[in-house]
Structures are given as structure tokens and as C-alpha cells.
Amino acid sequence: MSNDIVLGHTNANTFRKSVFDQVGYFDERLKLHEDTELWNRLARSFLFHAGELRRPVSVARRHNNNSIYARSTDSQRYYLSIWIDNIGLKNLYPCEKENFIYLYSRAISCRVRPHWLRKLVLHSSIYGLGFFAELFIQRFHRSFRHNMPNA
């Protein structure tokens, strides 16, 4: 998480069923970011090792109607809320808290223009929220739990 390393596309990985028995499946509450949230839970429980195949096992197709293009600040915050809800607030690792602050800051700065101002908002937010990350994440999660349907 700290180095933003991409493990590959979800279509290009094979797992035993026991992996999903342990961590669960896609969270159906999410319409966007469901693969990222699942990867975060997988990474908490398993080590990944790159393999080498002679032939591709999948093809990823991208087009302008992909649902990820519909992401918004609200969808990113909802993803972060579900992620914390699935892991448990008290179970977050320090690197996950840092990643939360980074992703939250990125979500609120993404619409800011021009570029230099967006970077200023992003880094100021990371720096400012980093000082009281624990309290901010607790309040964020409490607010989500309070506003979540059937909570």
C-alpha cells in the first residue's frame, strides 16, 4: 500500500476457493471499487508471488462506458467506508490508516483545478489529516455507520 504497487488485474489471478472462504467475496454494497476493496482484504491475509505464464489467461478490455469512469468523490468515500466496515476499525494496520488518509485526500482534491492547486490541496490534506488520523478515521467511520442503511 505504501508504495502503491499494483498486483495485477483481477481477471489475471487464480485463487483457491479456500481463499474466499477466509476473506469473503466482492462486497455487493459497492457498485464501484469492489475489486480494490476485495484486493485490500486479500492482501491482509495472503502473500502474493508473481508467476510466469507462456500464454495469457485473460484479456482486459477498456472502453468509455467502464463503470470506473463514473467514480466520484462520494463513490471513493463510500468505498473507504465499506473497506473499514469489512476490516473493522480496530483492526486497521498503520499502513492502512496512512493509505486511508492518502485516498481520502486524493478524493477531495481530484476536482480542483489548476494542477498546482490540486497538488497543494492534496498534500495539505495528507499532512493536516495525518496529525490526527486516528480521530479522523474514527469519526469518518462513525458517520458512515450512522448513515448506512440497516446499520
Image: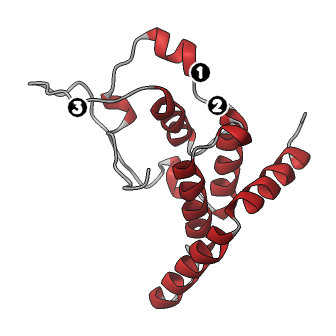
**Front position in the image: 42 or 30:** 42
Q: Residues within 10 Å of mark 2 (few under 14, many from 20)?
A: some
Query: Mark number for residue 24?
Result: 1
Q: Which residue is mark 3?
A: 50
Q: Are marks 3 and 1 in contact (CB under 8 Å)?
A: no
Residue 144 image position (x, y, % from top left): 82, 50
Question: Could you say whether the residue bearing mark 1 is in a helix, strand or loop?
Answer: loop
Q: Relative to 73, does residue 53 appear above or below in the rendering?
A: above
Q: Residues within 10 Å of mark 3 (few under 14, many from 20)?
A: few
**Front position in the image: 15 or 66:** 15
- Left-right relation of 1 to 30: left
Q: Relative to 87, does residue 65 appear above or below in the rendering?
A: below
CA distance separating discs 3 and 1: 22 Å
Q: Relative to 4, does residue 150 appear above or below in the rendering?
A: above
Residue 87 image position (x, y, % from top left): 66, 35
Residue reaching furthest left?
54
Question: What is the total number of numbered labels drawn onto the structure image?
Answer: 3
Q: Which residue is mark 2?
A: 27
Please tell me in which quadrant of the rendered image residue 10 appears: top left
Say which amino acid is labelled 1.
Answer: Gly
Q: Are marks 2 and 1 in contact (CB under 8 Å)?
A: yes
Residue 139 image position (x, y, % from top left): 82, 57
